[in-house]
Amino acid sequence: MFQPVTPAGPPPGVPNGSKKTATIVLSVLVAVLALAAGLFLFLFLSEKGAAADTNSQVTNTEQQIKDQKGKLSDAKSETTDLRDKGEGLQSTHDQLQACTDATKAALQALGNGDQAALTKAVDQMVDSCPKDLGTGGS
C-alpha cells in the first residue's frame, strides 16, 4: 500500500535559515578570497614587470657609464699626447726664435758694416740654428 514518505529536512513551518545563512556566508567569503587572490596576482605581476624594467634601466645606465669612462680615458690620453706635442713645438719654437734673433743680428751687423758684430752673430747662428732645418727633422 501507500506509505507516506517523510521529506528530508525540517518539518514544514520550522525555519531552515541556518544552512542558507552558512551557504551565503561561505559563498561571500569564497568570492572575497578569490578577489583578494586575483588582486595579489595582479600586484605581483605588475611589480615583477616593474622590477624587470628597473633592472633593464640599471643595465643600460651601467653600459652608458662604461662608455663614458672609455671616452674620458680616450680624452685624457689625447690630452697627454697633445700636451707632449705642444711641449715639442714650444721647444722647436724656442730654437727657431734663437736662430731668428741671431740671423737678425747678423743682418743688422752686415747692414752697419760692423765686422766684429757680424762674426759674433754668425757664430750665434751656427750655434743656435738647427743643422737639419731644411731636411724635415728638428
Image: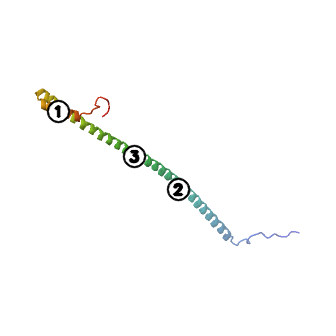
- In the rendered structure, which disc, 3 or 2, sits on the residue that comes first in sequence? 2
Q: Would you call the spot at circle 2 few (<14 residues within 10 Å), some (14-19), or many (20 or more)?
A: few
Q: Secondary structure at mark 1?
A: helix
In this view, the residue farthest toward the right is 1
Q: Which mark is residue 45?
A: none
Q: Which residue is mark 1?
A: 121
Please tell me whether mark 1 or mark 3 is closer to you in this view: 1
Where residue 7 appears, as percent x and y from the top left, is 77, 69
Q: Which residue is mark 3?
A: 73
- Residue 104 falls left or right of residue 78: left
Where residue 51 appears, as percent x and y from the top left, is 51, 54
Instruction: Say above or below: 117 vs 2.
Output: above
Please tell me whether mark 3 or mark 2 is closer to you in this view: 3
- In the rendered structure, which disc, 1 or 2, sits on the residue that comes first in sequence? 2
Task: Specify the quadrant of the image occupied by residue 24.
Answer: bottom right
Instruction: Say above or below: 53 vs 127.
Output: below
Q: Would you call the spot at circle 3 few (<14 residues within 10 Å), some (14-19), or many (20 or more)?
A: few
Task: Specify the quadrant of the image occupied by residue 127.
Answer: top left
